[in-house]
Image (spheres, rainbow, N blue to C red):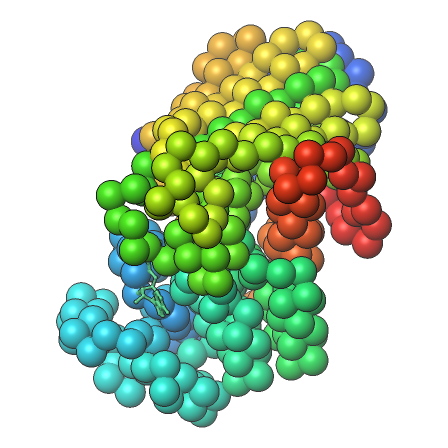
């Protein structure tokens, strides 16, 4: 089903799948039934801006995510458009200029990157570089007076995240993280089911994401300095996110351990990591992520029933189940919605669902997970100053 054709009536039908439970069970927090509805109504009916009024985005780093997802997604955005690129590979300049009709004057390399400050056609810079380069290129983007989207994980240390937030604050620019699943309807539904306690309080969440990258042992993802860590930094962050947004709460403590079967390849970053996070009310998140073992799931066990998403974190083909039946939501272009939502935040002051502070919170949590794995101890988490 095409997202744009998803009518209000259809959406209400989808929403009503679990509606009996919604109204039958008491919720502890304030109900926010409007959230999904507003989301759909807003984005379904979003008025496309004329091309010359759309904000211009420049992608920095034209690797697989820019090439496979962000470039194509920017062909569908209604409030922003692909205006420029920054690449260190001259052949990509021609390819992107041709494929997306990007003006030569809007194509930059890593040497003349800072001169983007003089380009009024670029409003937003989107950092899609290896994790260890996020902070430097983000701060330079803010100093060039551009709004900023930075891919996950936000950076490889909490202090870098703090510097990025400060740079954007100083430049009075907006900042968000590439957390695309906040715009995905099955995940929106998991947030609703969990936070509104539609099936009672969630007691346990299990989440896992893993794949095999051993075919490319030179990948930056295996380099501690460029990656900041292994699969936890790369994809475990989705599981942490999912736990927090399903429960609507911040974790209080964590234990973790790693598993290593290929020491020649994983001599800098972890191969597989498991962790268990405690939340208020004795809810638990059991997470796993791996660069050798495949997984892609999110399962929530609430007092009166279960709900799950599997595959959970893919770009397409996401499927969900609840005790009331399947989640029957459309597949959406997550990146298109994410970039339009950020542009709407800039233009119209709508809420930034994925701010820099959220990226910093998650990096902080991941550092504590690593500490727990190294020490074998249960680490108490100080989440003061952070929000869900
Ligand atoms: P990639 O290896 O495919 O691309 C990285 C790009 O950075 C390449 O174009 C490469 O040329 C460039 N680069 C510049 N300097 C480099 C250096 N010193 N070493 C290596 N590459 C360098 O990686 P990717 O999969 O596109 O990931 C890029 C970023 O996007 C990462 O932060 C990753 O976590 C994130 N990402 C997010 C999602 C998501 O779903 N949100 C998905 C994939 C990747």
Image position of 294 with respect to 135: above or below: above
On-image quarter of the N terminus: top left
Q: Residue at x 37, y 37 (%)?
A: 262
- The answer to whether residue 197 is seen in the rendering is no
> Relative to 132, is 282 on the left or the right?
right
In-front residue for pair 116/166: 166
Tell whether 219 sits left or right of 300. left
In-front residue for pair 380/377 = 377
Which residue is rendered at x = 37% and y = 88% of the image? 112
Can residue 320 be seen here? The reply is: yes
Measured as percent of width and height from the top left, residue 149 is found at 51, 64
Q: Position of residue 22 (x, y in %)?
A: 68, 17
Task: Check the image and name the residue furthest to the front.
Answer: 264
Q: Nearer the viewer, residue 332 or 240?
A: 240
Which quadrant, please, contains the C terminus?
Answer: top right
At 60% from the left edge and 20% from the top edge, which residue is drawn?
A: 300
Q: Is residue 273 left or right of residue 163?
A: left
Q: Quadrant of residue 59?
A: bottom left
Rendered view: 274 above or below 78: above
x and y, in percent, of residue 18 in the image? 59, 15
């Amino acid at each position: 089903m095409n997202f744009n054709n998803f009518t209000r009536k259809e959406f209400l039908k989808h929403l009503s799948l679990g509606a009996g439970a919604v109204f039958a069970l008491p919720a502890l927090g304030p109900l926010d039934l409007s959230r999904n509805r507003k989301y759909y109504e807003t984005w379904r009916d979003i008025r496309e801006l004329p091309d010359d009024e759309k904000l211009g985005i420049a992608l920095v780093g034209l690797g697989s995510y820019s090439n496979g997802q962000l470039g194509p997604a920017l062909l569908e955005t209604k409030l922003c458009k692909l205006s420029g690129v920054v690449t260190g590979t001259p052949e990509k300049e021609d390819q992107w200029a041709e494929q997306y009709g990007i003006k030569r004057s809007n194509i930059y390399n890593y040497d003349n990157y800072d001169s983007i400050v003089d380009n009024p056609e670029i409003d937003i810079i989107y950092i899609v570089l290896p994790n260890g380069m996020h902070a430097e290129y983000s701060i330079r983007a803010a100093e060039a007076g551009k709004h900023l989207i930075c891919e996950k994980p936000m950076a490889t240390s909490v202090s870098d995240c703090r510097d990025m937030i400060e740079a954007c604050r100083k430049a009075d620019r907006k900042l968000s993280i590439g957390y695309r699943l906040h715009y995905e309807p099955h995940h929106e539904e998991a947030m609703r089911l969990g936070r509104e306690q539609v099936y009672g309080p969630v007691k346990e969440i299990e989440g896992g994401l893993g794949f095999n990258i051993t075919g490319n042992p030179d990948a930056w993802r295996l380099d501690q300095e460029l990656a900041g860590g292994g699969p936890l930094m790369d994809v475990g962050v989705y599981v942490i996110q999912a736990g927090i947004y399903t429960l609507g709460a911040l974790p209080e403590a964590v234990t973790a351990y790693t598993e290593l079967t290929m020491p020649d390849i994983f001599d800098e970053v972890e191969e597989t990591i498991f962790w268990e996070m405690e939340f208020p009310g004795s809810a638990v998140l059991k997470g796993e992520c791996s660069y050798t073992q495949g997984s892609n799931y999110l399962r929530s066990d609430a007092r009166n029933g279960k709900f799950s998403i599997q595959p959970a974190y893919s770009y397409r083909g996401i499927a969900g189940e609840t005790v009331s039946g399947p989640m029957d939501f459309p597949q959406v272009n997550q990146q298109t919605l994410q970039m339009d939502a950020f542009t709407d935040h800039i233009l119209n002051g709508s809420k930034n669902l994925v701010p820099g502070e959220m990226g910093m919170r998650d990096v902080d949590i991941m550092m504590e997970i690593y500490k727990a794995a190294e020490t074998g101890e249960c680490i108490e988490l100080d989440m003061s100053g952070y929000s869900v």
